[in-house]
């Protein structure tokens, strides 16, 4: 047992590669939207495992599903059938309107699968992606990720066949498409680059362009999925369907699982793609339990309403927006960005001291993606604390 945070920091420094800039707390448990550190201090969590913990921490229904399934059958090879996997695939196709599912273990893997499927189905290999995009850290997903500092050390390995166009500019997509383009890949709302919400017509226009030019449209809904934006999926705000979509983050309520779904007529054949851990009984049973919680507790509507409430209050007369530090407030549902006029790192530390976890993305944007079960009261506390530290 560790007695102080310092002992954990010390071992982390010694044994773990320093890929993460961590906040100086050691978290040991969570309940609802609150996490507790090793010293017993509690925090309202507006990071939520970065849009993963949609149903909050230790939800009894999810814990029960994990315990029951783990005691029964955790993993078997995909050489055999399992019930949770087919049930989850049926559920996901019903929720998304897509036809078939491939299961993997993370967001980046779901992008790998999407890109491979698009190349295989079209026989083409060029892609159009957006500036500001984030699709993951594996070589293919990083190839479609814009941020130069993520890409720089790996440039020699990255695909040369990805063209980046300005986000929220459908004409730019049209111009970038050529005879060799397999697909256009977009986030319905850009997460990592600072909660960039496109104008209402953008995704629809891109959908029409892709249809007209016979190019596949891939929506990366890894972050926007499962009620995060106040609809089941980001695409649902526009009432459009991509040809391929990717899911991960909130899918498993914190248990690692990803999925790539495609419309009818697009699929891998036997042997063309695979994953040892893709869609284990344990992962799928957990995801099914989490989806049931989202349905039963009406968390999609809750996300929509609480997100609107938060933005309205933040924009009210003495709200957050009136602070000179705040440049812009934006978001949909409980996917909220507060863009500051200066780097937000210092505010992350101050919020932490006041018992609030927030995340700073793209240097100047505070990203709030709390569990969708967060209470209005807790959001009020968040508003008060943020207002206080920005004064
Ligand atoms: C987080 C994220 C990914 C990558 O997911 P990992 O599970 O970290 O590989 C891909 N796309 C989007 C939009 C994301 O937010």
Image: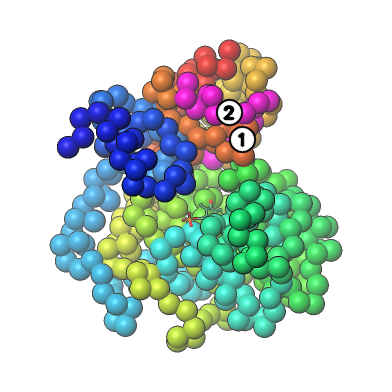
CB of mark 1 near ligand 1 (< 8 Å): no
> Distance between the Cα atoms at labels 1 and 2?
6 Å
- Residue 7: percent from the left, percent from the top? 27, 33
Q: Which numbered marker is on residue 363?
A: 1
Residue placed most toward the observer, 47 or 96: 47
Residue 87 in the image, given as x and y percentages of width and height: 34, 69
Which region of the structure is painted magenta?
Answer: 333-350
Q: Is residue 244 visible?
A: no
Q: Which tag, 1 or 2, sits closer to the chain's start?
A: 2
Check residue 335 in the rendering and tell me which mark sits there, or answer none: none
- Is residue 116 positioned above or below 105 on the image? below
* Residue 9 visible in the shown view: yes
Place of residue 111 in the rendered image (x, y in percent of width and height, measured from the top left): 54, 65
Residues at badges 1 and 2 in contact (C-beta under 8 Å)?
A: yes
Task: Estimate how packed mark 1 is, as few (under 14), some (14 to 19) or many (20 or more) residues with alpha carbons within 10 Å.
Answer: some
> Which quadrant of the rendered structure holds the N terminus?
top left
Q: Is residue 296 magenta?
A: no
198 sits to left or right of 76: right
Residue 337 magenta-highlighted: yes
Query: Which quadrant holds the C terminus?
Result: top right
Against 364, residue 55 (above or below) is below
Q: Nearer the viewer, residue 374 or 165?
A: 165
Which residue is located at x 45 percent, y 72 percent? 102
When asked about the image quadrant of residue 158, the answer is bottom right
Is 21 displayed left or right of 25 in the figure?
right
The mark found on residue 344 in the picture is 2
The image quadrant of residue 165 is bottom right
- State the residue lying farthest toward the bottom: 270
């Amino acid at each position: 047992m560790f007695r102080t945070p310092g002992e954990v920091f010390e071992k982390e420094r010694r044994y773990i590669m320093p890929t993460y800039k961590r906040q100086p707390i050691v978290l040991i448990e969570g309940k609802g939207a609150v996490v507790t550190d090793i010293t017993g201090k509690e925090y309202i969590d507006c990071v939520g495992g970065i849009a993963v913990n949609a149903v909050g921490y230790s939800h009894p229904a999810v814990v029960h599903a994990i315990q029951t399934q783990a005691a029964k059958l955790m993993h078997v090879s995909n050489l055999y059938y399992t019930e949770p996997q087919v049930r989850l695939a049926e559920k996901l196709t019903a929720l998304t309107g897509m036809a078939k599912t491939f299961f993997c273990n993370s967001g980046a893997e779901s992008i790998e699968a999407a890109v491979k499927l698009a190349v295989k189905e079209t026989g083409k290999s060029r892609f159009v992606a957006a500036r500001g995009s984030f699709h993951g850290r594996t070589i293919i997903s990083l190839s479609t990720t814009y941020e130069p500092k993520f890409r720089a050390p790996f440039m020699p390995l990255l695909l040369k066949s990805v063209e980046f166009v300005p986000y929220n500019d459908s004409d730019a997509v049209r111009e970038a498409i050529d005879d060799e383009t397999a697909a256009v890949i977009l986030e319905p709302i850009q997460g990592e680059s600072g909660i960039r919400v496109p104008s209402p017509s953008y995704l629809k226009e891109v959908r029409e362009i892709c249809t007209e030019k016979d190019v596949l449209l891939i929506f990366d809904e890894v972050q926007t999925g499962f009620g995060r934006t106040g609809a089941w999926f980001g695409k649902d705000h526009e009432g459009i369907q991509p040809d391929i979509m990717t899911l991960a983050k909130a899918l498993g309520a914190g248990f690692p699982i990803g999925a790539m779904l495609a419309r009818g007529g697009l699929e891998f054949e036997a042997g063309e793609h695979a994953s040892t851990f893709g869609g284990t009984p344990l992962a799928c049973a957990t995801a099914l339990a989490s989806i049931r919680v989202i349905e039963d507790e009406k968390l999609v509507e809750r996300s929509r309403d609480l997100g609107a409430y938060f933005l309205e209050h933040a924009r009210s007369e003495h709200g957050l927006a009136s602070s000179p530090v705040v440049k812009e407030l934006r978001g949909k549902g409980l996917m909220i960005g507060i863009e500051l006029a200066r780097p937000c790192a210092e505010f992350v530390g101050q919020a932490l001291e006041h018992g609030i976890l927030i995340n700073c993305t793209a240097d100047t944007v505070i990203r709030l993606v709390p569990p969708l079960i967060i209470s209005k009261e807790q959001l009020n506390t968040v508003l008060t604390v943020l207002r206080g530290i920005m004064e």
